[in-house]
Each structure stands twice: as structure tokens, then as C-alpha cells.
């Protein structure tokens, strides 16, 4: 069920009710049903990146290989991104950082370090505004281009991966990212490391959900995440998981090498 099939089903249902009403079979009150179902599906589709409602997002890979990918959103952060990088180095693991364009200023050295240490940088929009989902297609393109410009000034590389803020998708966002040829990256393990949950609770969540082909979502914005990351990498090592770049998960989904 995606946006197109949902919209077609909605229109057919409305026509059917109008037709049945014309032949005095049902009351027009029945129109409420398709309206309620349609809106519920739109809300679910927008809020759930794994639903592929407006666009195809890569959230995991179907594989028996013991591989997992780590992703960090909302950086660069002047304090915690460096700490995350140091833990990754200790475990010789590579990760993907979905950066917010407006956070780059005065943190250019962090972007340089992420790139120099062999990690991947992805786009997480420029503003990461709470109201970003009301933006037009043109505004979304500006958000994406501005961040890619800021990063490429430092690394000389354009960005090709995009993670929508809050995992919320809209038709405008889908259309803008398609025009700019972005690969959309979601997740299937949400650590909820920005909530008030304790380190123990967050780590437990990772432990329960760790499986082959997973994409884990962290935020490089707190000390708690740094500590959970260390335990996650230890756990992965003990259980024979290899930490791979998110490009490997994308490759398993699309058969395309990035
Ligand atoms: Zn975010």
C-alpha cells in the first residue's frame, strides 16, 4: 500500500458511495468511512519511513551475513561527534553520519575528521526544522543543496544519501530527493537515545533488536550515546557481527555499488 494505490482506492470508494447513494442504496454518511481510512493511512505513511508510502527507503537488508550498519544523526556536535569517532576508531568500525547543515559552522574540522577517517557523510537537511514537512519541493531542494554545498566545500564530495528528519516523509520531500538523485536511508533499530531513558534501557533495546542486515539509528549528541555505542560495539564483536558501511546494506537492496 503506497500513496498512489491508497489515493486510487480512496477515489474508487468515494465514487462507489456516491453511486450507491444515487440509487438510494446507502446514505452519504458512508462517505465518512473512506475519508477516515484515507487520512489514517496518510498519517501512518508519513510518520513511518519503513512503510515506503511516499518513497522507497532502505531500512535494512535481508541477509544471513552477520553484518550491521551504524548511523548517527543530528551532528556535527562540537563535543560528542569526536567522542563517537574515537570509540569507532578503537573498534575499527565505520559509520554513516547524517549531518544537519546549520551545525557545520564552527565544526568544519569535525566534518573533515569524519571524512578523513573513512566514514560516510549523509544529508539530514539544513535546518532540521520541526515544521520541515510543510516545506515545498523547492524549499526541500534548497535544504538538501545547501547542506551538500557546505560539506563539499570541506571534503570536495557531494552527498548522495539522505535521511529525512524525524523519519517523516511527504510527497514534496519524495519528489525533491528523487530529482536530486538521493538514496533514502531509514533504519530498523531505533535506539531512542535522545529520550530520557537510561543507558541501560537504551542498550537493552539495541541488544534485543540486533540482527543481520540491521541499520541502527543513534544520535551523536550525548555522552549517553557514546557509552551505549561502546557497549554495542563490544556486543557486536562478542556475537560475531561485522560493522559495515551503510553502502553495503544499500548494495544488498539494490544490487548497485555506490
Ligand atoms: Zn534528526
Image (cartoon, helix red, strand yellow):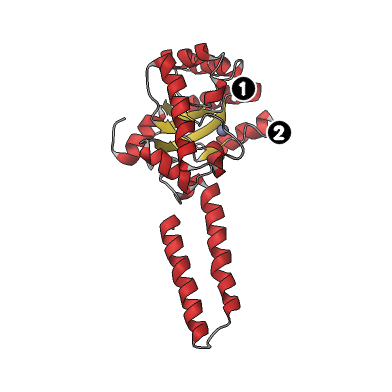
Residue 119 in the image: state x and y as whole percent: 43, 20
Looking at the rendering, the quadrant in which ligand 1 lies is top right
- Any part of residue 98 in sight: yes
Judged left or right of residue 67, residue 45 is right
- Quadrant of the rendering where the C terminus is positioned: top left
Q: Is residue 21 left or right of residue 244?
A: right
Circle 1 packing at 10 Å, graded few (<14), some (14-19), many (20+), is some
**What is the distance, in whole Å, between disc 2 and disc 1 at their CAs?**
15 Å
Q: Residue at x 42, y 46 (%)?
A: 55
Residue projecting furthest to the bottom: 24
Instruction: Work out whether residue 67 can be spotted.
Output: no
Place of residue 17 in the rendered image (x, y in percent of width and height, measured from the top left):
51, 77
* Residue picked out by circle 2: 196
**Figure check: 34 above or below 253:** below
Q: Nearer the viewer, residue 44 or 194?
A: 44
Disc sitting over residue 48 in the figure: none
Verify CB contact (< 8 Å) between mark 2 and mark 1: no
Query: Is 187 drawn above or below residue 34 in the view shown?
Result: above
Q: Give the percent coordinates (x, y) of residue 122.
A: 45, 28
- Which marked residue is nearer to the observer: mark 2 or mark 1? 2
**Label 1 beta carbon less than 8 Å to ligand 1:** no
Is 158 situated above or below 173? above
* Count of numbered circles on the image: 2
Tell me: residue 161, above or below residue 75: below
The numbered mark, 2 or 1, whose residue comes first in the sequence reads 2
Pick the quarter of the image with the N terminus.
bottom left
Q: Which residue is mark 1?
A: 227
Q: Position of residue 80 (x, y in %)?
A: 60, 18
Residue drawn at 41 percent across, 16 percent down: 155
Farthest top residue in view: 109
Amino acid at each position: 500500500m503506497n500513496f498512489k494505490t491508497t489515493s486510487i482506492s480512496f477515489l474508487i470508494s468515494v465514487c462507489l458511495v456516491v453511486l450507491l447513494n444515487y440509487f438510494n442504496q446507502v446514505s452519504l454518511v458512508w462517505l465518512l468511512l473512506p475519508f477516515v481510512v484515507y487520512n489514517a493511512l496518510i498519517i501512518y505513511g508519513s510518520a513511518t519511513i519503513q512503510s515506503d508510502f511516499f518513497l522507497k527507503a532502505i531500512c535494512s537488508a535481508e541477509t544471513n551475513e552477520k553484518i550491521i550498519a551504524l548511523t548517527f544523526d543530528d551532528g556535527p556536535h562540537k563535543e560528542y561527534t569526536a567522542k563517537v569517532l574515537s570509540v569507532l576508531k578503537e573498534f575499527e568500525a565505520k559509520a554513516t553520519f547524517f549531518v544537519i547543515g546549520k551545525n557545520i559552522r564552527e565544526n568544519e574540522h569535525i566534518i573533515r575528521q569524519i571524512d578523513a577517517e573513512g566514514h560516510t557523510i549523509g544529508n539530514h537537511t539544513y535546518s532540521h526544522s520541526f515544521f520541515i514537512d510543510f516545506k515545498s519541493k523547492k524549499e526541500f531542494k534548497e535544504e538538501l543543496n545547501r547542506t551538500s554545498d557546505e560539506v563539499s566545500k570541506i571534503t570536495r564530495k557531494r552527498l548522495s544519501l539522505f535521511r529525512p528528519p524525524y523519519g517523516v516523509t511527504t510527497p514534496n520531500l519524495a519528489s525533491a530527493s528523487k530529482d536530486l538523485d538521493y538514496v533514502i536511508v531509514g533504519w530498523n533499530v531505533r535506539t531512542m537515545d535522545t529520550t530520557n531513558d537510561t543507558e541501560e534501557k537504551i542498550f537493552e533495546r539495541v541488544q534485543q533488536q540486533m540482527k543481520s542486515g540491521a541499520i541502527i539509528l543513534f544520535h551523536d549528541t550525548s555522552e549517553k550515546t557514546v557509552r551505549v555505542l561502546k557497549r554495542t560495539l563490544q556486543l557486536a564483536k562478542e556475537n560475531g557481527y561485522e560493522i559495515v558501511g551503510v553502502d553495503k546494506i544499500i548494495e544488498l537492496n539494490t544490487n548497485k555499488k555506490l
